Amino acid sequence: MSTTKRQIPTAFGDDVFSALENFDRRIYFRWDLRADKLELKQPIPNHSYDIGTGLLNASTRLWHSGLIHPDDLHIFRYFLHKIYHSCSRYLGRTCNQTCKIRIRSHKKSDYLWSEIHIITYFDDQQPVVAFGNIRNIQAQKLWQQRIEHEAFFDKLTGLLNKETSRHRISEYLDSLATDTEQAGLLLIDADGFKDINDSFGHLFGDAVLADMGSAINHNFRQSDIKGRIGGDEFIVLFRNLNDLQILHNRCQVLIQKLQRQYQNGTQTLPFSISVGVSLYPEHGTDYAELFKHADRALYEAKSKGKNQYVIYHNSLFNQAASAKSRVPNDFEDLQQKAFKDNMIEFIFKLLYETNSPDATITLSLSMFGKRFNLDRVALDLFDSDVNQYTTAYEWLSPNGVSLKSAAHNTSLFSQIAQRNDLILNRYKATSYGVMSIYEDTTKAASSYQPALTALHLGAFAHCMITHGSDTLGCIGFESRQPRPFDDECLHALSIFAVILGNILLTSYSDDKLRQQNSHLRDLLDHMQEMVYVVDKITLMPLYFNQAIRQTLSESSAGHPCYELFHQRMTPCPDCPVQKLSGEGSEYIACDLSNWDKERPTTTRACNLHWNKNENDPPLALVIQEPF
């Protein structure tokens, strides 16, 4: 039986592009804006959208047929507004746009998150045609929503967790008017839960707490804020409290619903709840004040025999707060327990309380190191300019070896390069993300062994950190001795890489960019040359350095450079900015007599390609010799 040998491509061709499109689940389209006809590129790869092979009267269909999710129509409106009402800005250029919207699937009943890239071409200041592609990002969005849900909600009860409850209650209280609006804060605590948990076990205890959370959720309105803030303690903010009797009724119904008995052999164990209530604005106008008064009312309910609710009143002010202490003997043990129970919540809580990505990353590395008994946990940032990774954050056990540049000498450079080469060569796609894993480096090629021995690296697991299509760096778990990395460890590594790429490192990049901008401005201010940046269309200066500032008697915004600098009503003759092409990289030099008519100054101008957002104006950099 003969078989036909498949031709292997040696260069990019239609078959290669088609295979890549199918692999990436990306479909391409052409939209004739004059005929309003949208066509998909043939052959059309398999997709799940309700658009067939194209759309006639595309703008009408997209707007009125429900093809785009109603909540995302404003994005489509912005696209149409931009290309039809800002035409003059794109003369001789293209308008490039990217957006994420939900498009109806072929099942008609649901929508799929999609990322769309569109390039619009103009002719005589009118949009003529748009080319673009659509990529299905539904799985990515669902994963992101799952991470967000785990960060904000309590796993056991489905209610908000402690930090999210406090944050949302505080936000709501800040929005209220003290003279017209009212609310009630409830603290709900279980009576007899410890005995039930000890007698029936933790699984039964968890079921009791889940049932308690469900009862609280159904007893109050959807608009009320409900959360679990401790082991058996819950919080509710009763919003829009127009009638206090309604709150009395809700408390009483909940107490009756949760009053019950559990049987353990011949022993009967009672279960009930106690509730403390404080009122806004009568008992306080912020979270801390209302919580304090509700806690004292809860203590009063416990003292009076439990299984009841108490609304705070002034006579409780001097009474002791609840004697129940939740402060552990060892604070570090508490941190480790909280980290183990809900890693995502712990990290977001750190970020919320410190408001510092730097501190959050540093402490999280130590938590991972201790949790999984590692010798080194490190975050390496990728510099695309030099194509290399550099350690930015690092945690070490007593046996760990530091690879930070300040901590090692030049004699280890070659070993570190070999180590990095081994790690990079083992990266591959896994169910947890793009990872490089080696559980026993003694099995690596002999050429790597001197470096691995010098750096005491017996096992490692690294995960790539990305943001969109950009590689930001990698996060690595390392051990001095060979060891396995179980599913829990790899799952935690993957989750942390996602949080780093989408939240923590974006702030780090912004801070780094601000620092670089500050250094650049300082450098430009120390130059003798006159340096400024202008909008190529309006010739409005966006920046000018100290050499120019000191020559101006008065500077004000809203004037083009020829008026602000030279008191002219028209652009300078032979202005090089106006000779620059739309997007080119040319460098135009000339002599201008704009600063001093008697002494021309050498002037150079070029395009600036700072703007990735098409809403930003095209820019030019101008440098003139001092006069």
Image: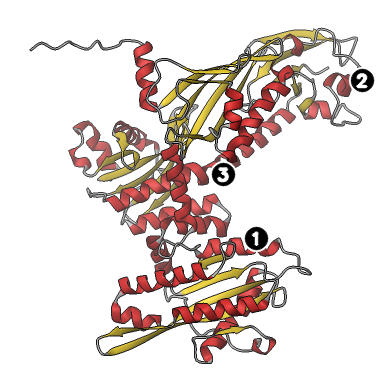
Q: In which quarter of the image is residue 514?
A: top right
Label 1 amino acid? Answer: Glu
Residue 37 horizontal/vertical position (percent): 56, 17
Spatial CA distance of label 1 from label 3 is 23 Å
Residue 75 horizontal/vertical position (percent): 62, 34
180 w.r.t. 84: above or below: below
Residue carrying label 3: 507
Q: Residue 171 carries which label?
A: 1
Asked if residue 501 can be seen in this view, the reply is yes
Q: Residue at x 83, y 29 (%)?
A: 549
475 w.r.t. 305: above or below: above
Q: Earlier in the sequence, mark 2 or mark 1?
A: 1
Front tag of 1 and 3: 1
Q: Residues within 10 Å of mark 3 (few under 14, many from 20)?
A: some
Front tag of 2 and 1: 1
Label 3 amino acid? Answer: Ser
